[in-house]
Amino acid sequence: MLLRRMAAALISAVAFAGVLVAGSAPASAAPRVLYYDTSQAQEFAAAWTQGAQIWNSRATNVRLQPVTAGRTPNIRIYADNGWPRAQTTSLGNGRVWMGREAITDGYYPPRITAHELGHILGLPDRRTGLCADLMSGSSAAVSCTNSYPNARELAQVEANFRSSAVATVTPRTYVWQPALG
Ligand SMILES: [Zn+2]
């Protein structure tokens, strides 16, 4: 009888654990898809695709995909002769530019595109000067080729795009420009 009670207690404990596991599964929720448009990216379309793939290879709560016909892109991509920059309108939405000024200076294009997309994903600039930081941007050496977010930057993006998240960003413009002097 005691044995039977213990077995019953064990079964209900397992069932309870099963409910807990099923109830805490936001990791399996579908990622939020953001569409980007490289049709005006000029010679840098491949670099932007690479930047998107870098985020896709790390983040699970958000996915960057090329825009399909008839759909409004979340991220519009341009190129000009100025500095690379990002203009955020809301989390996951905005415009980004590749600027030839940074290419002329020798900055690594995939690091620039992944960085600017990082702004769209809700990350601010952190001018630490460290190459290991993606959001250190132009404060790291021109020779820095690290194009991947560090663990903290990735965790922030994952948190921003959790299905239950209410993260918001203030519309603003971030510019990839080395400190003068
Ligand atoms: Zn920046």
Image (tube, rainbow, N blue to C red):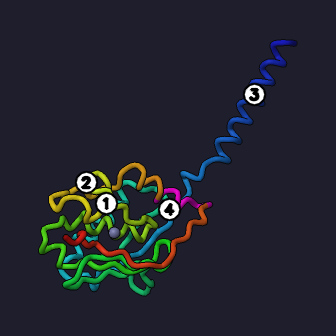
Q: Quadrant of residue 176?
A: bottom left
Q: Is residue 127 visible?
A: yes
145 displayed left or right of 38: left
SS label for mark 1: helix
> Mark 1 or mark 4, which has the lower sequence index?
4
Given the image, on which type of amino acid does mark 2 rest? Answer: Cys
In this view, the mark in front (3 or 1): 1
Ligand 1 found in image quarter: bottom left
> Mark 4 or mark 2, which has the lower sequence index?
4
Q: Which mark is on residue 136?
A: 1
SS label for mark 2: loop
**Span colored in magenta:** 157-164
Q: Nearer the viewer, residue 118 or 68?
A: 118
Residue 48: x %, y % from top left = 27, 71
Q: Which residue is mark 3?
A: 11
Q: Nearer the viewer, residue 69 or 157?
A: 157
Q: Which residue is mark 4?
A: 31
In this view, the mark in front (3 or 2): 2
> For residue 162: magenta?
yes
Mark 4 and mark 2: Cα distance apart in space: 28 Å
Q: Which residue is mark 2?
A: 131
Given the image, on which type of amino acid does mark 3 rest? Answer: Ile
Q: Which mark is on residue 67?
A: none
Residue 30: x %, y % from top left = 53, 60
In this view, the mark in front (1 or 4): 1
